[in-house]
Amino acid sequence: MHARIVRTSRQVLAGIGLMLLAIAVARAVPDFQADLFVRYPYAASLGCAACHTDPSSGALNPFGQAYLESGLAFTPGLEVLDSDGDGVSNGDELKFSPAGNPGDPQSKPGTGPPPTAQPTGEGAALYGSYCASCHGALASSSKRGASAARTTGAIAGNAGGMGYLSMLTPAQVDAITSALSAPVTTGSSSSNYTGLWWNPAESGWGISLNHQGDTVFAALFTYGETGAPMWLVMSAGTKQADGRTYAGTLYRARGPAFDAVPFTPVGPSAMTAVGNLAIAFDGSASATLTYTVNGATVVKRIVPQVFGGAAAVCTPTTGSRAGLSNYQDLWWNPAESGWGVTITHQADTMFAALFTYDASGNDLWLVMTQGTRQGDGSWRGDLYRTRGPAFNAQPFTPLAAGDVTKVGEARFAFSDGANGTLSFSVDGRAVTKSITRQVFASGSPSCTSPASAQPVAGTDGPTLYANHCASCHQPLATSTKGGTTLARTQSAIVGNVGGMGFLSNLSTAQLEAIVAALAPFVPTAPACGSCHSVPPVTGGHVRHEPRASCATCHGAGYGPGSTQAATHNNGVREVLAAIGWNAAARTCTNGCHGAGTWSTT
């Protein structure tokens, strides 16, 4: 808006437009964004129309006049003022989004009472009609928590083929995002979240959950400031009033070395409260993890990790589990409280995370990532120790081969579904432990591996794409996924991105055929300025004071009417020669913009 006012005032050298410019320059103009655009993001989409009835002449609407008279500061007094005399305060009118009446937009109190906000119920119906086919059912949608600004930006940028939704009004978009932010109430007492959860974009850390009754035990496997393994536990996360969040105190422990004989149980004095942890489930397929360690807060989106074709399905039971053949659970030795092992069992593969202590008493975790069934019925696999970025690193760089060290082997031999023996070695030091399922509440998990999906026949890429991909990503010739890679596709399936988990029944050869079919249709780089407005109303323009000349921050030749892609400079990094568009990764440069549709919301 500031750049538009500057440009308009050059054309109109008298009257209110010049006065607005003079006051804006005198005050350095940060209030346009800090006081209005940031507080009410919808105002940004209107640009000058937020305050002007005619941007070309500089004429102001009632709210714009009052805004000018307040010194271009959105003060509490201005918020309670009824500038247009319609009986509704500016603040109340600013809270609503129009149903299609341009005379009274959310950001411009001006011509009558604001429209009634769309009910969430309508949002649910709109979501079902326009969004569910790609993003899954509302209760487990991959887009839960999406903001109106982010959704509007995705539509404007045609992200994932969403451009066709441009016929939705702002009120309808608001209704959809309201439905996506509403608490999920579809879960029942039979829902059980036991399993291994992770963020597919941040391979190297994870969290094992054990859900019993209204309590969740969480073992978080991550790294300390030095990169050394660190595990933390929420031993008694309780169900919150919203019915979908479990929260509790987060602890870090010290204890005897993993091979200590005897192993002295860890008591309360060895447990240090370091913060809190909360997990808000959107359904059985996604959740938001929020935790604090010594004052540092981390927020992560997490999903169940799938490595055996399909995740096990867990339900609560109060009966005997001796007859179970799926061993997914929290296991321990009751005489040696303080260490344990979480098992995630999917089809013919077992993942085990052992949380214990090193020779100095520090927390140590080890993983068996690919345990396989042996001829004698036991499960065996290599045991690894890892190093990685600190738990609160931004970004969290996925682990590389050099971060993973084989330290030995692990073997599980089960006498029945509820008891067994764990044998493992670490750097030549062998340990054998009796283990049993840990029970801490009524309704312990009983897990089963779903039947393997039937393989899809054929390796004709175009046909496979048409049958499995085109409904979300448009026909092959105009696909939004042209030029994608096999690794990117596999990662999206494993992480159930956009509900793609159902494609786990496609073989590697079939995925390669789809990728090959997409190869000729590499998308071109988006036009500079098409991803965001010029200037953008988010990012650095929120955090930094805007200037009359774009060149102040962005370099010579860069202005409101020209973007100068060859010398694009966002104030942090200058990209010479080109904007660095990578079609396969959908990114403009490695560090400036990120995804193809640039947004900070």
Image (cartoon, rainbow, N blue to C red):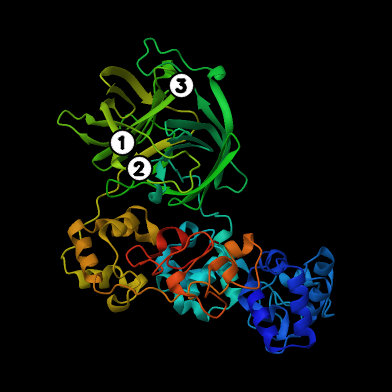
Q: Earlier in the sequence, mark 1 or mark 2?
A: 2
Instruction: Tally the numbered discs.
Output: 3
Marks 3 and 2, the one that precedes in the sequence: 3
Among the 4 quarters of the image, the one containing residue 538: bottom right
Q: Nearer the viewer, mark 1 or mark 3?
A: 1
Badges 1 and 2: C-beta atoms under 8 Å apart? yes
Residue at figure coordinates x 42%, y 19% from the top left: 334
In the visual, does 29 lie left or right of 564? right
Residue 153 image point, x, y percent: 52, 70
Mark 1, residue position = 404
In front: label 3 or label 2: 2
In the picture of the structure, the residue carrying the numbered disc 3 is: 338
Mark 1 to mark 3 CA distance (whole Å): 25 Å
Work out whether residue 289 can be spotted: yes
Query: Counting residues from the N terminus, which is met first, the one under dot 1 or under dot 3?
Result: 3
Local secondary structure at mark 1: strand
Q: Secondary structure at mark 3?
A: loop
In the rendered image, residue 350, in percent from the top left (x then y), is placed at: 28, 37
Tell me the quarter of the picture where residue 583 sits: bottom left
Q: CA distance from mark 3 to mark 2?
A: 28 Å
Q: Bin the neighbour count of mark 3 within 10 Å (Cα to Cα): few under 14, some 14-19, many 20 and up.
A: many
Give left or right: position of 226 versus 291.
left
Give the CA separation, mark 1 to mark 2: 8 Å
Return the x and y of residue 63 as percentages of the image width and height: 78, 78
Task: Name the residue rendered at 55%, 54% in the picture.
Answer: 185
Q: Amino acid at mark 3?
A: Gly
- Three-letter amino acid code at the position of disc 1: Val
Task: Name the residue beneath numbered marker 2.
Answer: 399
Q: Residue at x 33, y 19 (%)?
A: 434
Q: Are marks 3 and 2 in contact (CB under 8 Å)?
A: no
At label 2, the amino acid type is: Leu
